[in-house]
Amino acid sequence: MNLSCPIPLTNYPRVLLAHGGGGTLMRGLIDVMFSAAFGDLGLQTDTDAALFPPTEGGLALTTDSFVVHPLFFPGGDIGRLAIHGTVNDLATVGAVNGRLTCSFILEEGLPMEDLWRVVRSMAEAAREAGVAIVTGDTKVVDRGHGHGIYINTAGVGEVRHGLDLSPKSIRAGDVMVVNGDIGRHGVAIVAQREGLDFETVIETDSAPLNGLVAAWLAAGIRVRCLRDITRGGLAAVLHELAGAGGLAYHLVEAQVPVREDVMSVCELLGFDPLHIACEGRMLAVVAAEDADRAVTVAQTEAVGEGATVIGTVIERDVVPVTMRSRSGASRVVSMLSGEPLPRIC
């Protein structure tokens, strides 16, 4: 990736308040940096609203904000995370042809090289995911008030499949599938932020999941519902589904994939991997008859190589989420009331 910043560093090596003031410096930032990175991704800078062609099916809309600290971490950065997070929210409803907005809140004094690195990373992530970045906004806040960069995104996509991928489509007897190991993103962030030194570098799992979902739908997998596993982890997703659909969810601990190094960090810090966020993991609830095929299809995608069945949906019980431990006992899977790992997305 070319990380040579297009802003003349001899003149403006760091972000100034004037870069968000609407004048020539802001226009230069848009024209020289953002247009250079996003121009071939559909960016429209001549109007205050982007136009795109009408669609035959329905539209899906999502929005998100990213305040992760630090800005750069093993395997990713705030820019890639912003694209992946928005793409994955659209993917949960099977939306295609994503068109994204991107708004930057920059802190005065931010090195231009850091901003350019983030912008280039976003552009690369958007190309990989096959989405457009069509409009945006830039604001600058006083030094000491922004932790470098905050990013807000919105995404619009077309829904053509005609399926109801909501919790009310889930039936008792359906099966839960995840596309890979859980908990890695949150552990990667906290390890970087706290300066924890391990034998191996734990990288974020951040990745776009729209291709995986498209593959499932194209293969005719009877997908009932989709959720990307982010803040609150797998446990929060399952509690959300249980609350919305009136059913219960039973996991099998031996089938829930957690990397050994991630588990070691969780044990060291007193975390449960079921509560730790991912940024490249999708929970799919599918018809039991399609479970094996859903795993096989997922494993043909790079983001689904570790796909596996992790449990089943059962009739509503007093406890909404349970797990059979490796010893054979059943335990309650709770939902966290606090935030053990702030600023991870």
Image (cartoon, grey):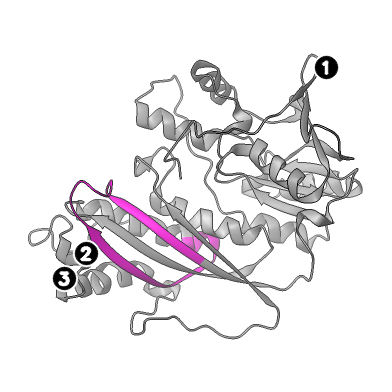
The residue furthest top is 327
Q: Quadrant of residue 87?
A: bottom right
| Disc nearer the start of the sequence (1/3) | 3
How far apart in space, not on screen, are marks 2 and 3 (Cα)? Answer: 13 Å
Q: Give coordinates of residue 320: x percent, y percent.
A: 78, 36
* First in sequence: mark 2 vs mark 1: 2
Q: Magenta stretch?
A: 126-154
User: Which mark, by number, is residue 6?
Assistant: 2
Residue type at mark 3?
A: Leu
Question: Which residue carries the number 1 mark?
Answer: 328
Q: Residue at x 82, y 46 (%)?
A: 246
Of residues 171 and 326, the one drawn nearer to the viewer in this rendering: 171
Amino acid type for the residue under numbered disc 2: Pro
Q: CA distance from mark 2 to mark 1?
A: 59 Å
Decide if residue 67 is on the left or right side of residue 286: left
Q: Nearer the viewer, mark 2 or mark 1?
A: 1
Q: Up-down: is 68 above or below 338? A: below
Q: Are marks 2 and 1 in contact (CB under 8 Å)?
A: no
Residue 25: which numbered mark, if any?
Answer: 3
Q: Is residue 275 above or below residue 66?
A: above
Q: Disc 3 on helix, strand or loop?
A: helix
Asked which secondary structure carries label 2, the reply is loop
For label 1, the SS is loop
Q: Quadrant of residue 272?
A: top right
Quarter of the rendering containing residue 230: top right
Observer-nearest of 109 and 127: 109
